[in-house]
Image (cartoon, rainbow, N blue to C red):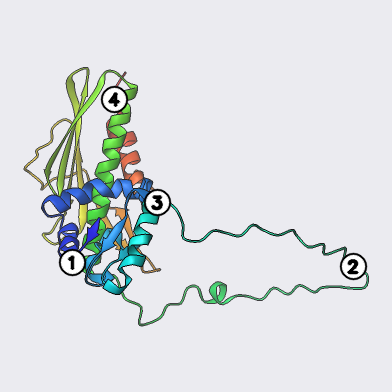
Amino acid sequence: MVLTKAYAQKADGFQGGVGFETMLSLPALRTEPDKFIFLMREGDYTNVFPYHFRDYYAINFSQDSEYKAKLDELIRRIYKKGKFEKAPLGNIPDFGVMDQMSTQVRSVEVPTSKSVFHDLDLPGVRKVSDLDKKKFINKSFIEICSLFEQLFDQLSRKHSGFEFSSEQINNQKKLFLLYLHGNQVSGVKIWIGGLSYDSNSICLSYGNHINVRLDSSMNEMISVDVNQQNQMILKITLSFFTKHESVTPEDVVRAIWTSSLAHSFKF
């Protein structure tokens, strides 16, 4: 996958074919990251990497003088052959037996800087921006949609009477309809929105009477918060079915299925 500044902008904004490719690649990046090889021909890492790729490595072809070395690296990545081989380990030396009567070692536990000052932070550390929150919500939205798809697909394989359909309304809204023996019994609508125009939240509406166009009512809203370690987390804001301070996309899918959807099906 060749990374450019234009590609990063389209991926972060979920625009066009690049946006669709981003939605497809996110689940695979978590489970099979070795399937992806990232290349960059120009620019620097901060400009060409989309937000969700920033923990990954790209082979840099921007310097013509290093082209042969980078091509060799690419070929080795494709065939999964490293450039260096580990030398075999030698035999373990014989340390003998220590005479505890003649030699005594006093162990003193010294507190490390991490254990003493872990709650302190540097004043200059970059704080989470509104754009960071927006990208985090977009990524979490894609993960939640993907996990619902996996859940419903697994149920359809396990129970012959269960079927589902999915419709991608746009890049920020998706609809699942759930059927039992051909009859619709429930559904889930997921979209990015909230109580205000600039709200960074994921909204969910579920049941058998879902209005695809009307987004003013919802059963659940998941917002983004920043913890004391300056890390972004998801928080469920409307319901009380989870006691966790923060939740993962998997927590959200499990909680909604068990508390609001599963009771509609009697196999």
What's under tag 1, amino acid-wise? Lys
- Mark identifier at residue 100: 2
Is residue 246 in view? no
Residue marked by disc 4: 156
Q: How many marks?
A: 4
Position of 99 relative to 52 (above/below):
below
Q: CA distance from mark 3 to mark 1?
A: 38 Å
> For this rendering, which residue is in front, 196 or 16?
16
Percent from the top left, x then y, of residue 229? Answer: 40, 68
Which residue occupies the extreme bottom position in the image?
123
Q: CA distance from mark 4 to mark 1?
A: 41 Å
> Which is more N-terminal, label 3 or label 2?
2
Report crowding for label 3: few under 14, some 14 to 19, many 20 or more residues within 10 A (C-alpha).
few
Q: CA distance from mark 3 to mark 4?
A: 30 Å
- Mark identifier at residue 244: 3
Q: Is residue 254 left or right of residue 90?
A: left
Report crowding for label 4: few under 14, some 14 to 19, many 20 or more residues within 10 A (C-alpha).
some
